[in-house]
Amino acid sequence: MDLDRHTLVFIGGLHRSGTTPMARCLAEHHEVSGFRGTGVEEDEGQHLQTVYPPARMRGGPGRFALSERSHLTESSPLATSENAQRLLSEWGAYWDLHRRVLLEKSPPNLLMTRFLQHLFPAARFVIVVRHPVIVALSTKKWARWQSLESLLENWFRAHDMFQADAAYLRHLHVVKYEHFVTDPGQSLKEVAEFIELEGEIPASVVQGHRSRAYERTWHEFGRSAHPWQQLRFRRICERFEDHARQYGYSIRDLDRCDPFPG
């Protein structure tokens, strides 16, 4: 595969952060080829390759960022030219190579940006970030055995590592999920400019109400009449509030959404 004829775009972000609708929007553009009909979960590239372990081998949704082995950089023994060619060969079987932009989406890309950049120096990264409380609550159905506190720890660990890695990236665009669903036209326009696409990216698959049920759950938790639940809510807020504000969010006020730092 001649990469001089293509632009590789990697989408990353924790499970339930909005990577799937972002990838589906981009794949609708006439210049972009994404994965579809592959038979694997969410058509994610992590399940269509044999170079690195997928997130499920590192604890899965809500947990994989707590494993140091999930964080791959240019110093990984897997970061070889042979593995770059293997990935292109394995993913290439699912891309339309007549299209200029080749898209791969997987949640663990959030912790693999430096690794992927080393393999593909001209690659571009679109990272989707969503409120830590909403991500934790929506991931709970896949990780029932994990506490809310543990799910929040996973969010902050993942984004702390990503933020540190971002300084090494040459082509990075961060999208706040809340901005994406509130004004998809503007968010996708910015992504199109970043990838240098001609024309608009369709926004038909974007749904703006997907957080409401989780917001109600959190508000009910905070207003609970049970003393132990009130105590737990306060402790979660005290533990994570300052950290959340570093990313433009608030544990107490779910409506707060400032730009991602950097």
Image (cartoon, rainbow, N blue to C red):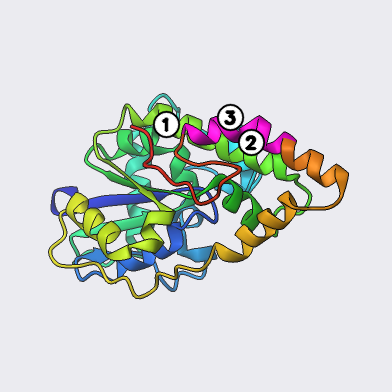
- Left or right: 62 in relation to 230: left
Q: Say which of 238 and 176 sits in front.
A: 238
Q: Say which of 37 and 246 sits in front.
A: 246
C-alpha gap between disc 1 and disc 3: 15 Å
Q: Amino acid at mark 1?
A: Gln
Question: Is residue 178 covered in magenta?
Answer: no
> What type of secondary structure mainly makes up the magenta span?
helix
C-alpha gap between disc 3 and disc 2: 14 Å
C-alpha gap between disc 1 and disc 2: 15 Å
The residue to which callout 3 is attached is 68
The residue to which callout 2 is attached is 153
Q: Are marks 1 and 3 in contact (CB under 8 Å)?
A: no
Q: Amino acid at mark 2?
A: Glu
Q: Position of residue 202 (x, y in %)?
A: 27, 71
Instruction: Identify the secondary structure beneath mark 3.
Output: helix
| Residue furthest right as drawn | 227
Q: Position of residue 192 (x, y in %)?
A: 21, 57
Q: Is residue 156 above or below residue 28?
A: above
Instruction: Identify the secondary structure beneath mark 2.
Output: helix
Q: Identify the residue at image location x=24%, y=36%.
A: 121
Q: Is residue 64 visible?
A: yes
Point out the image quarter for the C terminus: top left
Name which of mark 3 and mark 2 comes first in the sequence. 3
Q: Say which of 42 and 86 sits in front.
A: 42
The residue range painted magenta reads 235-246
The residue to which callout 1 is attached is 163
